[in-house]
């Protein structure tokens, strides 16, 4: 048969204990000619040790500038099935929770309009539908919205906000990450769908300093749960850990970064004024220790991958804010966007902008006061641009 | 007469509440503690006394609708139709009934692995690679498959000193943000884009192409009276952004593309502050389909870490305790001039004390 799929190199990836994407894609190829050509092209990449994709031109959904990534093979004569192979980013629900019914409906839509291949999920958080032709974009969108789904962000816009499992299934959640993600995503639909920023802007929400969404490494703005008061202690539960023979000294006391934990008999003592909320003791003794009661979030600014000026972690902009309502957060976000719009350069992430103009100029611009929690240490060079000085009275 | 239906836009994602298991909904924000029951399984206990059981399984992330339907069928059978996915692309089934745990695991193990919790290697965060990306220097799904085949025993057990987080990004744009992982595999281009001067004027808009370069390495020029661009090769860092807007500037170079390996990053604040990954192996040529040199190198690092680190030490914490010279010594990885940084703030990585171990 002339349309036989011969992929001797890829077949090597059907072996081994880890689930095989090749096995899965080959099954799909029996139903979708598009996937057959995808596998043929991938086999060629494996043979030639290089990729064969072109980045897309102007494809998208009417009225949206983001959410669709155009993709074309560089070899359309050889692999006509993937001459168009566009991506749709479907905005995931907060915390990546689904019912099988909702997921099956999404799969029906994608089977009807695309390759039947997807990423669950993309790096930013979206459910990524991989591979369809230009003519199917609008019909896919129509079917998605009919079932209450919408697209996420791409390009120089607000990227799809995402969050950890939060209070839905985690005792460490210091604020409602799912609710804030839902709130921000809905409030900023225009910024999400219509790119008008200098560059991308990612917001990630983690409920505690364990930071399961990697907000401090991967988001222009990280909103990370934190508490201010004392760690809650259940001494009876702690005594059970002691009785179990656990090495409390080695596993907990010695690991505390500020040495603020001591044990007397079967009782744990914590110098909370010296605790930096690192989470280690809480992670290690989950039945005995819990985050405090005065909860909120810290806000970090500027994390990004290396392009252009090198990778950055987010730095603390606000050490603690209450999260009882989200209006203060809206206000903060809008002040940042306004400042970035005025002072940022094209294709300059907010973190690079802050590095270029200095943290002092940035916080002044968005109306925050300097606090020592923003830095590891004060400056160690004397090149200070003093703004106030005395003049002789005339 | 045609029927017009309103075109819906800007409706945002559906509300998450409708996707929450009734036990989760009832105990939202009122969880007391959780504990691991065995690899891939934990229980969360609420203040009310209710429990929800989670079973975590691997997914290759690049999957088909058929694969998803397999998961939803199992969710219908064992978890009242409720499931979620993690930030590392694992699937989690949320069970109200403890008795369903083992039958679910038995069915999952017919096509995937259960694990990825506690002191394990969890799923590898990764990117698109040759499957779908124009600027990839290697494949991502294939690398994940061969590395996890090699390390599967660490996914299904909890025998490491602490959690070990792996990531793969297929070029230094790092859609997988691998810069804060215990071990990162990073695809690298090592040569500037070639310029097809014959077709460039027809295929590409010069100002857009010039503007696409993050480092101002692409400049306008003219050759034989025709407008085109030139690349300042000293400035090029092989990101492929110019190829994104201009197909006449291909970046792929089969002979020179490959991967580098990075170690010692972390994200959580536990014990120590978040850390970037640092260079371990500067370059390994692509060797598909199974990249044996890469899997050997990664496995070596994992095994040396497993043998030498103390309980609760992440990769970076262990290396900081023993010092980098000893890391290179123990792993047998060669230290080269490429390990010496020469970009912004390079000096902050130079040793400015005499506190070396001899």
Image: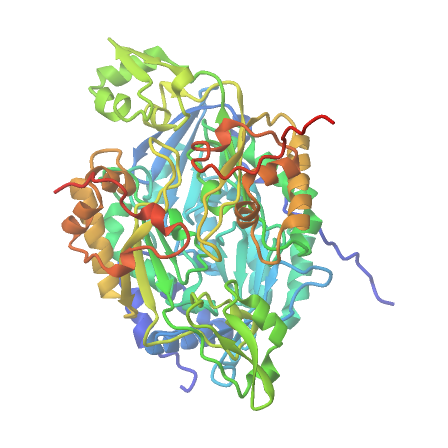
Q: How is the image coloured?
A: rainbow
Task: Out of B269 and A129, give the one closest to the viewer.
Answer: B269
Quadrant in the rendering for residue A86: bottom right
Residue A76 in percent (x, y) is at 52, 82
The answer to whether A51 is drawn above or below residue B59 in the figure is below
- Looking at the image, which residue is at 46% across and 52% down? A305
Task: Out of B248 and B145, give the one closest to the viewer.
Answer: B248
Residue A376 in percent (x, y) is at 43, 33
Quadrant in the rendering for residue A89: bottom right
The answer to whether B132 is drawn above or below residue A222 in the figure is below
Task: Out of B64 and B205, give the one closest to the viewer.
Answer: B205
The answer to whether B79 is drawn above or below residue A196 in the figure is above
Q: In this view, does B252 lie to the left or right of A247?
A: right
The answer to whether A30 is drawn above or below residue B155 in the figure is below
Quadrant in the rendering for residue A235: top left
Q: In this view, does A369 lie to the left or right of B300?
A: right
Residue B338 in percent (x, y) is at 28, 60
């Amino acid at each position: 048969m002339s349309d036989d799929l011969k992929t001797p190199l890829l077949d090597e990836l059907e072996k081994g204990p880890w689930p095989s994407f090749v096995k899965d894609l080959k099954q799909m190829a029996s139903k979708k000619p598009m996937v057959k050509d995808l596998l043929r092209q991938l086999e060629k990449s494996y043979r030639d040790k290089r990729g064969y994709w072109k980045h897309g031109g102007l494809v998208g959904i009417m009225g949206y500038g983001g959410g669709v990534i155009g993709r074309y093979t560089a070899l359309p004569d050889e692999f006509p099935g993937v001459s168009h192979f566009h991506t749709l980013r479907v905005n995931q629900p907060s915390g990546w929770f689904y019912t099988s019914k909702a997921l099956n409906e999404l799969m029906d839509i994608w089977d009807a309009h695309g390759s039947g291949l997807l990423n669950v999920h993309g790096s930013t958080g979206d459910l990524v539908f991989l591979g369809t032709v230009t003519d199917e974009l609008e019909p896919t969108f129509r079917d998605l919205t009919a079932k209450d789904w919408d697209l996420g962000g791409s390009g120089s816009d607000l990227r799809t906000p995402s969050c950890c499992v939060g209070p839905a299934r985690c005792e460490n959640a210091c604020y409602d990450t799912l609710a804030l993600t839902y709130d921000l995503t809905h409030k900023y639909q225009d910024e999400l769908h219509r790119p008008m920023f200098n560059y991308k802007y990612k917001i990630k929400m983690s409920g505690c300093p364990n930071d399961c969404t990697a907000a401090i490494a991967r988001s222009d703005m990280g909103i990370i749960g934190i508490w201010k008061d004392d760690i809650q202690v259940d001494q009876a539960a702690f005594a059970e850990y002691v009785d179990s023979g656990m090495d409390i000294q080695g596993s907990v006391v010695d690991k505390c970064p500020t040495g603020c934990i001591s044990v007397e008999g079967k009782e744990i003592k914590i110098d909370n004024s010296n605790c930096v909320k690192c989470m280690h003791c809480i992670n290690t003794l989950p039945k005995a220790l819990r985050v405090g009661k005065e909860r909120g979030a810290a806000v970090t600014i500027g994390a990004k991958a290396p392009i252009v000026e090198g990778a950055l972690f987010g730095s603390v902009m606000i050490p603690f804010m209450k999260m009882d309502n989200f209006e203060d957060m809206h206000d903060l976000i809008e002040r940042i966007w306004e400042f970035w719009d005025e002072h940022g350069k094209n294709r300059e992430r907010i973190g690079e902008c802050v590095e270029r103009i200095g943290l002092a100029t940035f916080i002044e611009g968005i109306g925050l006061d300097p606090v020592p929690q923003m830095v590891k240490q004060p400056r160690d060079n004397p090149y200070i641009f003093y703004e106030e000085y005395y003049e002789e009275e005339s | 007469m045609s029927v017009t239906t309103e075109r819906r836009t800007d409706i945002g994602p559906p509300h998450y509440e409708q996707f929450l298991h009734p036990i989760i909904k009832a105990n939202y924000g009122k969880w007391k503690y959780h504990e691991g029951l065995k690899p891939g399984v934990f229980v969360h206990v609420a203040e009310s006394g209710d429990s929800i059981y989670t079973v975590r399984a691997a997914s290759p992330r690049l999957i088909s609708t058929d694969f998803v339907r397999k998961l939803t069928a199992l969710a219908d059978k064992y978890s009242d139709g409720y499931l979620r996915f993690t930030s590392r692309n694992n699937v989690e089934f949320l069970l109200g009934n403890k008795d369903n745990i083992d039958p679910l695991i038995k069915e999952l193990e017919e096509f995937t692995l259960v694990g990825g919790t506690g002191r394990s290697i969890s799923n590898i965060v990764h990117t698109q690679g040759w499957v779908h990306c124009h600027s990839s220097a290697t494949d991502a799904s294939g690398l994940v498959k061969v590395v996890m085949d090699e390390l599967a025993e660490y996914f299904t057990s909890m025998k490491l000193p602490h959690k070990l987080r792996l990531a793969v990004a297929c070029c230094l744009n790092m859609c997988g943000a691998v810069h804060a992982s215990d071990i990162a595999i990073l695809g690298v281009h090592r040569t500037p884009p070639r310029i097809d001067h014959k077709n460039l004027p027809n295929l590409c808009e010069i100002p857009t192409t010039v503007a696409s370069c993050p480092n101002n390495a692409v400049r306008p020029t003219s050759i034989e009276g025709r407008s085109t661009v030139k690349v300042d090769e000293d400035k090029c860092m092989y990101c492929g952004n110019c190829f994104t807007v201009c197909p006449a500037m291909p970046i792929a170079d089969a002979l020179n593309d490959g991967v580098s390996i990075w170690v010692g990053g972390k994200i959580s604040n536990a014990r120590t502050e978040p850390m970037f990954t640092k260079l371990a192996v500067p370059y390994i040529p692509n060797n598909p389909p199974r990249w044996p040199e890469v899997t050997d190198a990664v496995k070596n690092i994992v095994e040396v870490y497993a043998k030498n680190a103390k309980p609760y030490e992440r990769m970076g914490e262990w290396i900081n305790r023993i010092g980098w010279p000893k890391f290179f010594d123990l792993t047998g990885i060669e230290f080269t001039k490429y390990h010496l940084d020469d970009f912004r703030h390079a000096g902050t990585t130079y040793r400015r004390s005499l506190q070396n171990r001899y």
